[in-house]
Amino acid sequence: MAKKGDIKNAVTNYQKAILLNPSLKIDPEKEAKKLASEAFLRKGEDIAISGDIKNAIASYQKALEFNPALGINPEKEAKKIAAEELVRRGKLLAQDEGKILEAIKAYDEAQSLDPNLKISALLV
């Protein structure tokens, strides 16, 4: 439940678990928020890899709601992950498929998402 952002029900389930096993030393709300933030981080990464920057940003923002200490910038993180994936795809296009023009297009798109990204000719 926490992994889907349903903190209230997750907390209730943790509280039931503590009643069944009082030796559990967990803070139900803290644990639920931790699980939720981790799930939304992973979801954001998966969405960014697919190239959907807008929804990746939304997922990273949700992760921050549950754990402000993450200290990430949702937009930068989404663009960085998407750019890294484009570089990976560009490398595959160039090396495995010989599609140099398509690889260059992927590299250009990656560079536009993350201007600080360094793309070496050695990748190709």
Image: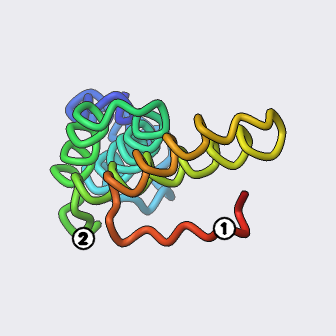
- Label 2, on which residue? 71
Residues 120 and 39: in front is: 120
Q: Amino acid at mark 2?
A: Gly
Can residue 82 be seen here? The reply is: yes
Residues 9 and 2: in front is: 2
Q: Secondary structure at mark 1?
A: helix
- Direction front: furthest residue: 101
Quadrant for the N terminus in the image: top left
> Residue at point 59% right, 35% down?
102
Can residue 18 be seen here? The reply is: no
Position above or below: 99 against 80: above
The image shows residue 104 at horizontal and vertical percentages of 55, 46
> Total of numbered circles in the picture?
2
Residue 121's tag is 1
Residue 119 occupies which quadrant of the picture? bottom right
The image shows residue 55 at horizontal and vertical percentages of 26, 31
> Residue at point 81% right, 46% down?
95
Residues 92 and 63: in front is: 92
Residue 112's tag is none
> Residue at point 34% right, 42% down?
36
Q: Amino acid at mark 1?
A: Ala
The image shows residue 52 at horizontal and vertical percentages of 34, 30
Judge left or right: residue 95 versus residue 27: right
Judge left or right: residue 54 versus residue 79: left
Q: Earlier in the sequence, mark 1 or mark 2?
A: 2
> Residue at point 42% right, 36% down?
43
Distance of label 1 from label 2 (alpha carbons): 33 Å
Binning the other alpha carbons within 10 Å of mark 2 as few (below 14), some (14 to 19) or many (20 upward) gives few
> Of tags 1 and 2, which is closer to the observer?
1
Position above or below: 91 against 16: below
The image shows residue 87 at horizontal and vertical percentages of 57, 51
Quadrant for the C terminus in the image: bottom right
